[in-house]
Image (cartoon, rainbow, N blue to C red):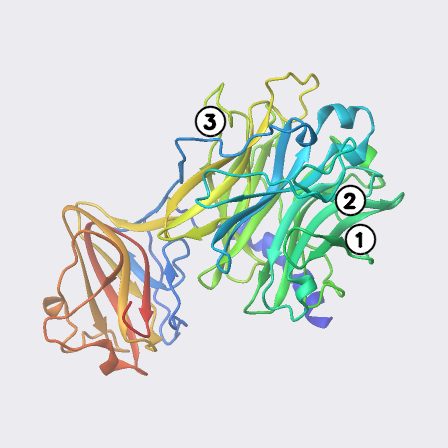
């Protein structure tokens, strides 16, 4: 418990430090002071350009952020059934490695049922499946009745006291209880005065049972969750409101009051939860009308990637900003739009809401909820719909370290070499090149690994092994403290890894 009090103190001090010193500007040329004598743990994990903490210094290098490309046949899922209402909203998509199939759980929303106060019928959790992730089937599961029939794909209904909101699913192969193999986190009102974050369990992702101890803790809408397998923790991120002093939180007063922020809790056993920590809130650099409408996050190559929902209250538009973290507590913002809304008239012209991405082959697939009308629109029209879109990104392609016409240099911090093969995710323009030499702990080139002995890389590859003409390999240097020095021209590096074996 003591560690969590420390985290709470740090969570107050950290934002103050950012206000005083400011975060690094991603658009500026990179330049870090040398930290002599400080070893950085590289290990055998990928080092992403998005978080260049591994760098000691650079020259003529810029950090460029990249955007996913929207699928040309969007949207991939639309409301077509009466129980889905007008909107498909929050949800989760996974690729099930055991079954070799894409699975989607999504929340529905009916404007008419909500207006009538019929909260049980306002929103359901439904299930869809796909072989390719692009064409989806809504199977008739026969589980929950809607208007007298069970011929639907509904897998979970709310308690009925207020709306069910959110749909964060984890397939948890680490749980020894097969009845809890799948976990679904959502917001609901269990009984009058007992609202908060709830969980349901399932052996197959289809037949769900709500936890008898719901709610797990007090919390508000827009729920996201993931499992941190390294720390063996379940992490829940949800939206909450910073309300004026003296105003009590309840569903009636929250609308339009306070500032929306992102709160994190974690647990090892789903019973005991950490105190809430506000991990992201708007600051003085954000426009005054901006709120944070929740954040989808997922583990990626030893760090955490977040997709922050940025809500503009003035025009009621939602877009997505990229964030990242080494510990899922302290998040770095890029302060750039990662996934924008579409043009007027498009299915995603007013709102794009993040879902946790997934890696599919050599790409990152980002499913997102989309709307073609502003949030809080008083008068709904038949053509206003909430749907699901898909966008794709190169593997590791969140950002790149790039050199232009002038040759650039990247020098890593010293680290203990634990792998045997240096692999690059990189690309060069015509006439460009990437050369890597290995330096010893005093920054002198090591014989056999010097610039003149490196075979230059030209082209576009996700796992390009760096080789040296002398025939030496990094196996010869295992256990030694080294640095890498990259020479780039008309080229960019997305990531590198010192792998233990050949790909």
Camera sees residue 346: yes
The 10 Å Cα crowd at callout 1, few under 14, some 14 to 19, many 20 or more, is: many
Q: What element carries label 3?
A: loop
In terms of depth relative to the viewer, which is nearer, 304 or 171? Answer: 171
Q: Which of marks 1 and 2 is nearer the N terminus?
A: 2
Camera sees residue 291: no
Q: Quadrant of the N terminus?
A: bottom right
Q: Which of marks 2 and 3 is in front?
A: 2
What's the CA distance linking mark 1 and mark 2?
8 Å
In terms of depth relative to the viewer, which is nearer, 199 or 282? Answer: 199
> Given contact means CB atoms under 8 Å apart, are the residues at marks 1 and 2 in contact?
yes
What's the CA distance linking mark 2 and mark 3?
31 Å
Q: Which of marks 3 and 1 is nearer the N terminus?
A: 1
Q: Which of marks 2 and 3 is nearer the N terminus?
A: 2
Name the residue located 47 percent from the left edge and 64 percent from the top edge.
Answer: 302
Q: Is residue 153 left or right of residue 44?
A: right
Q: Which residue in the protein does label 1 denote?
A: 215
Q: Is residue 347 above or below residue 60?
A: above
| Label annotation for residue 188 | 2
Question: Where's residue 234, x and y in %?
Answer: 64, 62
> Given contact means CB atoms under 8 Å apart, are the residues at marks 2 and 3 in contact?
no
Name the residue located 26 percent from the left edge and 77 percent from the top edge.
Answer: 442
Q: Is mark 2 on a helix, strand or loop?
A: strand
Q: Which residue in the protein does label 3 denote?
A: 342
The 10 Å Cα crowd at callout 2, few under 14, some 14 to 19, many 20 or more, is: many
């Amino acid at each position: 418990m003591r560690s969590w009090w420390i985290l709470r103190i740090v969570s107050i001090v950290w934002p103050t430090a950012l206000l005083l010193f400011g975060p690094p500007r991603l658009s500026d040329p990179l330049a870090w002071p040398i930290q002599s004598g400080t070893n950085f743990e590289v290990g055998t994990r990928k080092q992403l350009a998005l978080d260049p903490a591994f760098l000691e210094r650079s020259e003529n290098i810029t950090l460029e952020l990249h955007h996913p490309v929207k699928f040309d046949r969007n949207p991939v899922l639309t409301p077509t059934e009466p129980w889905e209402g007008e909107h498909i909203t929050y949800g989760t998509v996974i690729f099930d490695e055991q079954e070799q199939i894409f699975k989607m759980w999504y929340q529905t929303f009916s404007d008419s049922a909500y207006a009538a106060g019929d909260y049980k019928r306002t929103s359901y959790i439904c299930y869809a499946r796909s072989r390719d992730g692009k064409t989806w089937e809504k199977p008739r599961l026969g589980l929950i009745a809607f208007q007298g029939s069970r011929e639907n794909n509904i897998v979970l209904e709310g308690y009925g006291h207020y709306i069910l909101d959110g749909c964060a699913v984890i397939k948890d192969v680490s749980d020894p209880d097969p009845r809890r193999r799948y976990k679904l986190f959502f917001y609901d009102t269990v009984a009058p005065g007992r609202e908060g974050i709830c969980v349901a369990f399932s052996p197959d992702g289809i037949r769900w049972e709500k936890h008898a101890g719901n709610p797990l803790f007090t919390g508000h809408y827009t729920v996201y969750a993931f499992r941190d397998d390294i720390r063996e923790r379940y992490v829940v991120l949800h939206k909450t409101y910073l309300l004026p002093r003296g105003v009590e939180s309840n569903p009636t007063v929250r609308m339009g009051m306070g500032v929306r922020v992102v709160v994190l809790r974690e647990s090892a056993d789903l019973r005991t939860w950490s105190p809430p920590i506000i991990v992201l809130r708007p600051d003085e650099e954000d426009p005054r009308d901006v709120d944070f409408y929740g954040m989808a996050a997922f583990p990626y190559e030893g760090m955490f990637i977040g997709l922050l929902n940025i809500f503009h209250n003035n025009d009621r538009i939602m877009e997505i900003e990229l964030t990242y973290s080494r510990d899922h507590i302290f998040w770095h913002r890029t302060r750039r739009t990662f996934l924008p809304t579409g043009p007027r008239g498009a299915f995603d012209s007013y709102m794009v809401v993040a879902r946790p991405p997934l890696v599919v082959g050599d790409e990152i697939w980002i499913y997102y909820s989309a709307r073609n009308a502003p949030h809080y629109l008083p008068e709904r029209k038949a053509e206003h719909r909430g749907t699901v879109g898909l966008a794709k990104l190169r593997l590791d392609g969140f950002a790149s370290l790039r050199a232009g016409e002038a040759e650039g240099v990247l020098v890593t911090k010293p680290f203990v070499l634990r792998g045997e093969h240096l692999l690059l995710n990189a690309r060069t323009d015509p006439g460009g090149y990437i050369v890597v030499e290995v330096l010893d702990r005093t920054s002198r080139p090591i014989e056999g690994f010097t610039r003149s002995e490196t075979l230059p890389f030209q082209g576009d590859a996700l796992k390009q092994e760096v080789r040296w003409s002398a025939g030496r390999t990094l196996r010869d240097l295992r256990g030694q403290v080294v640095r890498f020095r990259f020479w780039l021209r008309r080229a960019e590096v997305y990531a590198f890894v010192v792998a233990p074996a050949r790909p």
